[in-house]
Image (cartoon, rainbow, N blue to C red):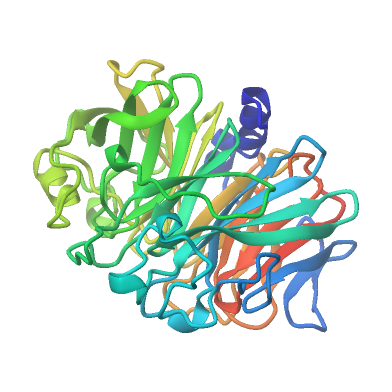
Amino acid sequence: MQTRRNFLTTSSLAFLGLQKLLANPSPSPTSKFGDLIPDPQRIIDLPKDFSYRVLSKHGSTMDDGFKVPGKPDGMGAFPTADGKVVLVRNHELSLKMQDQGPFSNNKKLPENIDPALCFDPGPELRNPLIGGTTNIVFDPKTGQKTSEFLSLIGTDRNCAGGPMPWGSWITCEESEDLTIDRGKLHGWCFEVKASPEIGLQKPVPLRALGRFRHEAVALDPATGILYLTEDRTDGLLYRFLPEKKNDFSSGRLQALIVAEKTKADLRNYSPNDAFPKIGDKISVSWIDLEDTHAPNDDLRLRGHQAGAALFARGEGIHFTESGIFIACTDGGPDRYGQIFRLTPSGSPDKNDTLELFIQGDKNSPLINGDNLCPSPSGALVVCEDLIDETFADRTHLRWIDPDGSISTFARNSKNNSEFAGSCFSPDGKWLFVNLQGRGLTLAITGPWL
């Protein structure tokens, strides 16, 4: 079980000193680790003295007899009582990606799966949705995977999510078309236990968290408030106030509003009318949302009309003791991405503070930052997801130190398939990451700084 202290420590190290980063950003991605060494296997290029292991590959047979699903995305790492690590891994699979599902015949639910354990098994158990999660049990002492299995099935495009300090992962559906009703609506969040025991978990949608194109979540363990991102170019930033702490079954869903500028556009798509500018500290509050199940996929539209601010594809989000950090993948005039910092007041009734920390441009080493995680040394590891695929032929893991220097830590050796799901083991010795388009999950180790 992950304790609150463990949770705070592992989620905050990367952001200590980020004020310095914005005050003196590095002009180029000069690597503090030295040159990247080309990988003869053409999987991932790493600095000297670092190495990787392939833990999982799409299509391989898992311990439950099913195949490793494709499109691995967001991921969390959790300690077990016997010193192992459980990775809970999302799979961003939609119905049209049948060739990447976990079953031999993905157009029919297997007979050995109880339909009650599949959220959307399809009419007459045909054409089940094949998104969901898998759990990987990893032994950090040996560097070996000990088991791998399906833990959630029947959901749609599980993109990212967030770890909870009681040992579970909130997985989020990033459904493309929320107006489709197959008898089951989609666009929910689900809670998956970081269990090392092989077996599917019963899927229960957390309906109180709203229905929209969910991306990721971050919990403030002191207040119990959950913060949620939305992966749309006209998305909102949400928070959920539970009626009972750590219980997401009931409560109020709200959207962020700039106190002195209702309907604010924080995307900075126009360089001539930039708001906010880097370093600006803005007073923000929150408004209650109605009809949060949104059958017409209009929650963000109604929220904006009521005064909520627009964000450009909110993706990765992390709670730290220095604030909550949010990656907006295609914000800024060049659409190379933004990172915001939200500083909660500590009370849901008082205004919070929002600051634009980083904004990428054509001269910046930060290109479309997506998932992000803290490192043991207090740095930030950022996964690239190149929106403009013609911009570069490789994606990278960027390493941002508290003193503001930006290094290139790793490179996709083969193509520009996005990195996703970066997270460190609880002991800080292993970095786990996915190469989504290639269907690979890697474990990296070396002399972390």
Identity of the residue drawn at 36% across and 80% down: 96
x, y (%) of residue 181?
19, 64
The picture quadrant where one finds residue 109 is bottom left
Identity of the residue drawn at 81% across and 65% down: 52
Q: Is residue 195 left or right of residue 32?
A: left
Say which of 347 and 341 sits in front.
Answer: 347
Say which of 88 and 255 sits in front.
Answer: 88
Say which of 430 and 379 sits in front.
Answer: 430
x, y (%) of residue 298?
14, 53
Q: Is residue 159 left or right of residue 240?
A: right
The picture quadrant where one finds residue 347 is top left
The number of numbered discs placed on residues in the rendered structure image is 0
Identity of the residue drawn at 25% across and 34% down: 253
x, y (%) of residue 138?
77, 53
Residue 29 shows in this picture? no
Q: Is residue 414 above or below residue 163?
A: below
Residue 4 shows in this picture? yes
- Quadrant where the N terminus lies? top right
Q: Is residue 58 above or below residue 150?
A: below
Say which of 349 and 88 sits in front.
Answer: 88
Q: Is residue 255 left or right of residue 18?
A: left
Q: Is residue 41 left or right of residue 199?
A: right
Identity of the residue drawn at 56% across and 40% down: 168
The picture quadrant where one finds residue 421 is bottom right
x, y (%) of residue 446?
86, 55
